Image: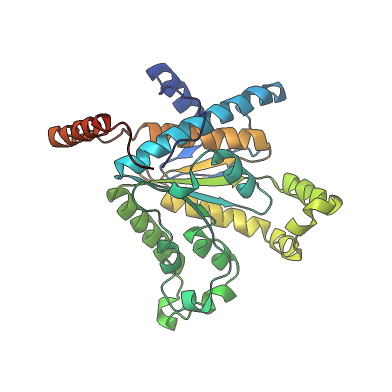
Amino acid sequence: MAKSPGAEPIPALDTKSRAALERFVSRYRVTRGKGFRLRDFDPRDTAGLKSEYKPAARESLRRGVAWLAQEQEKLYAQDRWAVLLVFQAMDAAGKDGTIRHVMSGVNPQGCLVTSFKQPSAEELDHDYLWRYSRHLPGRGQIGIFNRSYYEEVLVVRTHPALLGAQKLPAQLAGKRIWKERFEDIAAHERYLARNGVLVLKFFLHLSRGEQRRRFLERLDTPEKHWKFSAADIREREHWDRYQEAYEDAIRHTAAEHAPWLVVPADNKWFTRLVVMSAIVGAIHDLRLEYPRLDDRQREALEAARAQLQARPGGKR
């Protein structure tokens, strides 16, 4: 993958910068579900940063995007790790905008964004993880799931009729199904981690009041009418059930190898800053580097150099 023309080189994080980044991100990271309560996380939180910090946050985001573009090239060249970024949220929490801003500098050749909508007839004829597994990133790639297999313990749990459409044998759709699905998902993510996939999961935590404000903004702005659906209002009526489902999902699937980031989403500039910071910190810890050539490969390069230098002209 070619570098972006005129890309500004961003130096690697030093020990002090990495420690500061970790202190910032750690307040939102959940790696152990026991005792997790969603109400302990404030959707309006900005870690003490005032609105005057917005220009600095935008600059930090810009530098993060440039750094990520550099690391993506190493990821692609090294061809050992894959990165999976999972985004979950209530409607209007800003998933699309966050993905667009944070990933704006990466090379599309090494990045795939998949949005999961209503399953097709073919997908319903397979196990529920099948359609998600088909879109997992390969080595050297960054995969982004805009919604994910967590819909199977969120939307499907909130709307039981959807479970019936999955054609499960009756004896397999009992009271334990949600606990069993948490176990499946946790095992799936453990398997991915053991096979070189860095898994980061982001729940953009939006308040109900801010969702209402954003819905009204969409209705008041003609350019945003396309974003609005009557289904958004119907889903809003299930707010409390969704919050319970998210809390349960995070509680059962948070792990060191597949952490959740519960990101305050009422202030978009802060949401993007936290998401970028978490990605930068996690990819930094992979210690990516370009492949090192052995003696035979270096000799081949020198032979190619000598051949090119011996024939400066050549036919057009």
Residue sticking out furthest to the top: 16
Indicate how the structure is coloured in the image.
rainbow
- Provide residue 270's location: percent of width, then percent of height: 63, 33
* Picture layout, residue 48 above or below residue 224: above
Along the line of sight, the residue nearer the viewer: 130 or 172: 130
Visible residue check, residue 48? no
Q: Residue at x 80, y 56 (%)?
A: 225
- Provide residue 182's location: percent of width, then percent of height: 42, 59
Along the line of sight, the residue nearer the viewer: 8 or 102: 8
Mark count: 0
* Picture layout, residue 309 above or below residue 133: above
- Provide residue 275's location: percent of width, then percent of height: 54, 38
Q: Is residue 211 left or right of residue 42?
A: right
Q: Residue at x 36, y 40 (%)?
A: 75
* Picture layout, residue 170 above or below residue 25: below
**Quadrant containing the C terminus in the rendered view:** top left
Visible residue check, residue 187? yes
Along the line of sight, the residue nearer the viewer: 25 or 253: 25
Q: Is residue 210 left or right of residue 285?
A: right
Q: Residue at x 30, y 55 (%)?
A: 191
Q: Residue at x 32, y 44 (%)?
A: 81
**Quadrant containing the N terminus in the rendered view:** top left
Residue sticking out furthest to the left: 296
